[in-house]
Amino acid sequence: MRVSEYVARDGWELAALVRRGEVTPAELLACARAQAAAAQPHLGCLSVDDSAHAEALVARGPRTGPFAGVPLVLKDLYAFWRGTVVTNGSRLVRDHVASFDGTLVRRLLEAGFVPFAKTTSPEFGLNVVSEPLLHGPCRNPWDPAFSPGGSSGGAAAAVAAGIVPLAHASDGGGSIRIPASHCGLVGLKPSRGRTPVGPVAGEVWSGLASGFVLARTVGDVAAVLDAVHGPEPGDPYACPPPNTTFARALEQTPPPLRIGLWRQPLAPGVSLDPAVAAVLEQAAAFFADHGHAVEEVALPLDAAAFSEAFLAVVAAHLARDVGWWSATTGRPADAAHLEAATLALVARGRTLGAVELLTALHTLQTSARTLGRLFTRFHLLLSPVCAAPPPRVGEIDQNDPDLARFLARNRPYVGFTILYNATGCPAIALPFGRTRGGLPVGIMLGAPLGGEARLLAMGALVERHRPWPRTAPLALELATKTAP
């Protein structure tokens, strides 16, 4: 198979070629590695080389599972794969070797994927760009002067650059959806409890975070969700089971729905960039033209209180996690091993009292009740993913000693996404428009808990009527010059 042919196909199509014997997993892996070698100097999207483990998987013989033989990359953030290095984008962790498989990683392996690298993530996933001091900046394949977003920025860049058709990712405040929007991809944050976070953790960031994938097509997202969803022993949360397969949901034309149009982010002082506002108007008109009732809605939430509560929960968990990693690695949690904003958030987390933390959790849980009541009036919410287009590389520095400035620069990118992390509800980012400079701008649809099938059906509607490029132009440019 030529690399240009590999780059043009999504994961399901590649898996079908393997099933029919038209291509081997070894050939696909060779294509993926060749495209990675060509793209990495331009993008910096890969942080750990797991090629030896991938070759060992392929050498064992035929893979099983719906995606047997399809190359994959894992996000370098708590992606535990036994015997491989995970760095969490941090000098504190930099060479830790996993001693077990994370449940989601194991399910991806059982689905037949062949992971061969890990992708660049900001330190401990705390930034809306992916520029850790440990690995250097990750760049956007649509324009390397700009960021692909964070914290799954390396994952998104790898997919948009044609290295892999889809990539493992995770989302604690928008970290799947933000890079999906910036790179022209499909990014679903599943419902809390839909995908596993074990076997050690029962929840991540008090239930704010979940793991899944970023992909080029809605079909791949649905097929992977069918392969990996479901509870595991000891789960503290339950998610409503699906009524059918997620792939089958794509075959259904959504009935007329009531859609709430949400314009104002939960980010004090932030307004929509004109390019983003224009794309949102186009999306509202699109859904109205397809028979859905679109009505403007305001969320009755205190944006400042909500943001402060969210930050408190993240800081408390970060302080705990950094302490554990420091003890595990034997390295001090200091400026030689952590970036400045990380250190400041750790300090904040350490000073939180129990009552203050419980108050923050109560605020987030109250927001879930508010959103739940809103979903008795609307089937879905429509909003931008981010209030602003992708930032330039270097604009948002996690090593900034001024924590307030660092947080302010993050704010335009998380003001819509964090609501769904706080409430546990699912949300999907879909490619929909571009800036004048040609950078992708996504829209987001949110649904009640367990509503992934409806989100995927609406995503398929958009994909049919407003198809998007599967990769950035750079991907095809590199592929035509590359031989496996």
Image (cartoon, rainbow, N blue to C red):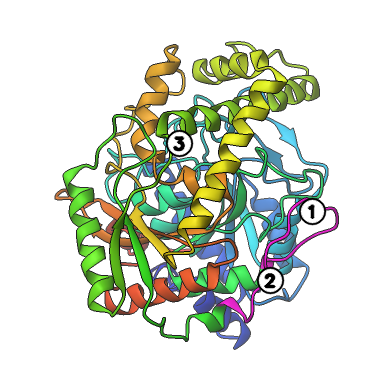
Q: Amino acid at mark 3?
A: Ser
> Residue drawn 54% across and 67% down?
452
> Residue drawn 50% across and 45% down?
152
SS under mark 3: loop
SS under mark 2: loop
Residue 58 found in image quarter: bottom right
Q: Is residue 241 in the magenta section?
A: yes
Q: Is residue 100 above or below residue 464?
A: above
Is the Cβ of the residue at disc 2 closer than 8 Å to that at disc 1? Answer: no
Q: Nearer the viewer, mark 3 or mark 1?
A: 1
Query: As drawn, is 56 to the left or to the right of 315?
Result: right
Q: Amino acid at mark 2?
A: Pro
Q: Nearer the viewer, mark 3 or mark 2?
A: 2
How much space separates mark 2 and mark 1, taking CA atoms? 14 Å
Instruction: From the top left corner, tell me how far across and down residue 175 is, in percent.
Output: 49, 45
Instruction: From the top left corner, tell me how far across and down residue 177 is, in percent.
Output: 44, 51
SS under mark 1: loop
Instruction: From the top left corner, tell me how far across and down residue 240 is, in percent.
Output: 67, 67
Label the magenta part by its dominant secondary structure: loop
Residue highlighted by disc 2:
241
Residues drawn in magenta: 228-246
Of 102 and 405, the residue lying toward us: 405
Q: Residue farthest to the right?
A: 233
Residue highlighted by disc 3:
130
Residue highlighted by disc 1:
235
How much space separates mark 3 and mark 1, taking CA atoms? 30 Å
Of 106 and 478, the residue lying toward us: 106
N-term mark: 3 or 2: 3
